[in-house]
Amino acid sequence: MQSKVFQLLVDNTSGVLSRISGLFSRRGYNIESITAGTTSDPRYTRITIVATGDDEILEQIEKQVRKLTDVRSIKELRPDSSVYRELAMVKVEIDNADQRVQVASIVDMFRAKVIDVADESLIIEIVGNTQKVDAFIRMMQGYKILEIARTGIAGLTRGKDEVVVLS
């Protein structure tokens, strides 16, 4: 089993995300992560999907998605020619001032940010590739993690050669 990151440009229409995710569920394909947002042209939405499977399944996913009427473009975002980022918010319980200082030190090491401070907890925002986010969460395992919210991967290819321009 391997993972592939697909980037789709789709018409910004009602139900498009539902139709795409429905294709995955009908065929029994696994989605590890899915993110969507309007592009610089409000007529289109950029969707980034991380899917897992063997070569045959991943090839089938690409072919099936390409057939959907709302899909204008689909391409694989390869790690060597793309930039991926993920956002996570981690709420950690803090019992005392020493813990607060220790957690702040880890936050600084990872170039994360404390975005909310309460008497008994902190909410930390971390942005980076999935490995960085995973490593940060592992470091926080020594503390009581109350909640985690992760966005999933968003990605773009490097340079301007592979930019898709829709008219």
Image (spheres, helix red, strand yellow):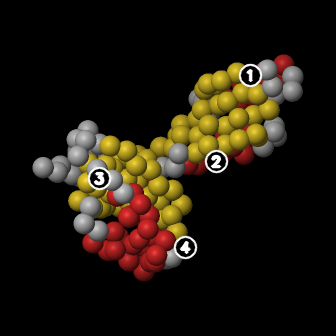
Kind of residue at badge 4: Met
Q: Nearer the viewer, mark 3 or mark 2?
A: 3
* Side of 43 relative to 103 (left or right): left
Kind of residue at badge 2: Asp
> Closer to the N terminus: mark 4 or mark 1?
4
* Side of 46 relative to 116 (left or right): left
Residue found farthest to the front? 14
Report crowding for label 4: few under 14, some 14 to 19, many 20 or more residues within 10 A (C-alpha).
few
> Closer to the N terminus: mark 3 or mark 1?
3
Res 2 seen here: no
The residue that disc 1 covers is 118
> Closer to the N terminus: mark 3 or mark 2?
3
The residue that disc 4 covers is 1
Report crowding for label 1: few under 14, some 14 to 19, many 20 or more residues within 10 A (C-alpha).
few
Kind of residue at badge 3: Thr
Horizontal and vertical percent position of residue 92: 75, 34
The Cα–Cα distance between marks 3 and 4, rounded to whole angstroms, is 33 Å
